[in-house]
Amino acid sequence: MNTKILFALALCLCTQVAIGQKYFSKSGKISFFSDTDMEKIEAENTSASTVIDFSSGAIEWAVLIQGFQFEKALMQEHFNENYMESSKYPKAKFKGVIEDHTKVDLTKDGTYEVMVNGELEIRGIKKPVSTKAKIDVANKMFTGTCSFSVMIADYGIKVPKVVENNIADEVDITILAEYKPL
Amino acid sequence: MKKKILFAVIILAVLGGAYGYYEYNRPVAGTEKKKADVEISASDLLAAFEADEAAANSQYSGKVIQVNGIIGSMESKESGNKISIQTDNPMSGVICEMEDGQDISSLNTGETVTVKGVCTGFLSDVVLVRSSLVK
């Protein structure tokens, strides 16, 4: 009898640990920056959603393309209609793994550098992405940050000749999220 | 006569240039003075996306949607204010990114609110951007 109770208790504890390893945010920030001599273009989205499962290191991000906010209306219209075709491809997604997730100790404050590998899907095209990322742990909460760049041609984005000097071939992407336990 | 034509061409060029410059610098329009394309409850809006995301996207995305419901949570950050409106689904809601200058400090969680904003689609929640408070 006692062993049964013990077993049940142990099971409860285990499930709790398993649940306690998933973290999420619905306010992930993704910004990108295209820098040429002719023009600097930047936009930001503050409602990306992301989940990390520390038991496996799995990480996922999703963002709505129409949610990227530009300073200039025309840029935003061109971005949605001509380049990203956001009504056809409303989301961009990332699915990957934090390779060295075991070195992150969420009970210990500090900054952990990790390696993330996965697939980024933009306009329905999936390409591998491999990047360093940072996890800042403070008070059992943590912030994840990362920057990397993508070649827009990899995702089938064609830039018309007239504006080819205004849009960079390689766009810098910065992401940030404050994760909470799920 | 020639002078007149030249004059007209110059005027047109200046006007065209001015229009181009204005167009190029035109800021993204807010929703405060825009009329809503659709008025719907937060629960019905979410239900539409959960039932058929592609159909709901073509019906609502990119449009000014006015939603009403109960405030589930709010957050204020340097990147802006957000209101999350509750729905019948406890896991999902309607997230409204408020436009700069929209004061939400008088609102409280649990109150009923009406907000209009541009719908950008559905992740785990429906998202409205550049939102403004209706009441």
Image: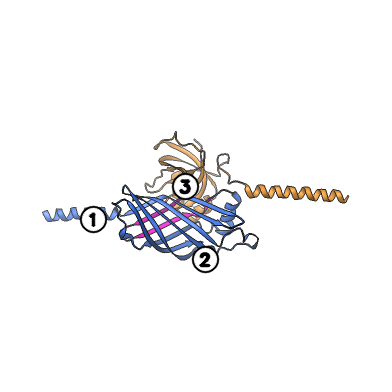
Chain colours: A blue, B orange
Which callout, 1 or 3, points to the residue nearer the camera? 1
Give how far apart the Cα atoms at labels 3 and 2 are: 35 Å
Please give the label number shown on residue B83: none
Spot occupied by residue A76 in the image (x, y as percentages of width and height): 57, 52
Residue bearing the label numbered 1: A14
Task: Judge if badges 3 and 2 mark residues of a common chain.
Answer: no
Chain part drawn in magenta: A47-69
- Which residue type does callout 2 highlight? Asp
Q: Is residue A39 left or right of residue B127?
A: right
Q: Measuring 86% from the left and 49% from the top, which residue is drawn there? A: B3
Disc number lying in front (1 or 2):
2
Instruction: Name the main secondary structure of what is drawn in magenta.
Output: strand
Residue situated in front as seen by the camera: A67 or A30? A30
For badge 3, the amino acid type reads Leu
Q: Is residue A68 magenta?
A: yes
Name the mark nearer the viewer: 3 or 2.
Answer: 2
Residue at mark 1 to residue at mark 2: CA–CA distance: 43 Å
Q: Are the two marked residues, 1 and 2, in contact with CB atoms closer than 8 angstroms?
A: no
B41 in relation to B9, above or below? above
What residue do we see at 74% from left, 48% from top?
Answer: B14
Residue with the mark numbered 2:
A154
